[in-house]
Image (spheres, grey):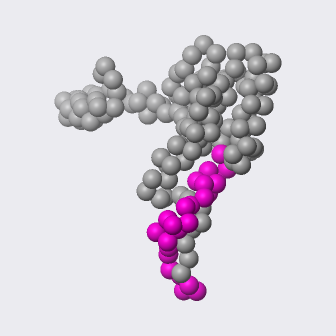
């Protein structure tokens, strides 16, 4: 499931609204809801979602900002878990985008990974450039590859 205009669902504290002011030819305005691009907007939204789904995270729900995955072992369990999640969404007055939702699927893409009942794999589209890269055919190309690998070394464990 995907949150609909996630950041815009969080109200700004009245004392902080003045810090989001901007000027236009017709006057000065400020945001009453959290705008996209605000310095800590992502962290604030994630904190709100963690608060909403606190007891369900890593058991029935995986949540990253406005993306939610409801996971269940069986079909009956899945319907019950969806009801719990929808009640929580309604209780905290959050909205989801129905066009970006899929229900009852046994596998799917989430945050660049393909999640299946057997486990988690990297989305092949994300590593396509690496798998289709030609092998280095001279010393210059080999050194270029080594430099690229040295750069991404910090992002890949046990490389």
Measured as percent of width and height from the top left, residue 25 is found at 54, 86
Boundaries of the magenta span: 3-27
**Residue at point 62% right, 19% down?**
116
- Position of the C terminus by quadrant: top left
Could you say which quadrant of the image residue 82 lies in?
A: top right
**Residue at point 75% right, 23% down?**
78
Residue located farthest toward the bottom when viewing the structure as drawn: 26
In the image, taking residue 74 as reference, residue 62 lies left or right, namely left
**Residue at point 27% right, 36% down?**
151
Residue located farthest toward the front when viewing the structure as drawn: 15
Vertical placement of residue 12 versus 133, above or below: below
In the image, taking residue 27 as reference, residue 9 lies left or right, namely right
- Position of the N terminus by quadrant: top right
Residue located farthest toward the top when viewing the structure as drawn: 118
Measured as percent of width and height from the top left, residue 19 is found at 46, 69
Measured as percent of width and height from the top left, residue 104 is found at 76, 26
């Amino acid at each position: 499931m995907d949150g609909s205009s996630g950041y815009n669902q969080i109200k700004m504290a009245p004392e902080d609204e003045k810090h989001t002011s901007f000027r236009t030819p017709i006057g000065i305005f400020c945001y009453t809801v959290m705008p996209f691009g605000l310095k800590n907007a992502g962290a604030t939204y994630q904190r709100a979602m963690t608060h909403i789904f606190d007891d369900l995270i890593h058991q029935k729900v995986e949540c990253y900002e406005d993306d939610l995955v409801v996971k269940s072992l069986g079909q009956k369990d899945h319907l019950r878990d969806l009801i719990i999640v929808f009640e929580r969404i309604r209780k905290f007055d959050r909205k989801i985008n129905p066009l970006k939702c899929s229900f009852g699927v046994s596998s799917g893409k989430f945050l660049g990974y393909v999640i299946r009942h057997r486990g988690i794999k990297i989305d092949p589209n994300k590593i396509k450039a690496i798998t289709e890269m030609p092998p280095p055919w001279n010393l210059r190309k080999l050194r270029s590859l080594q430099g690229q690998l040295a750069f991404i070394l910090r992002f890949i464990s046990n490389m």
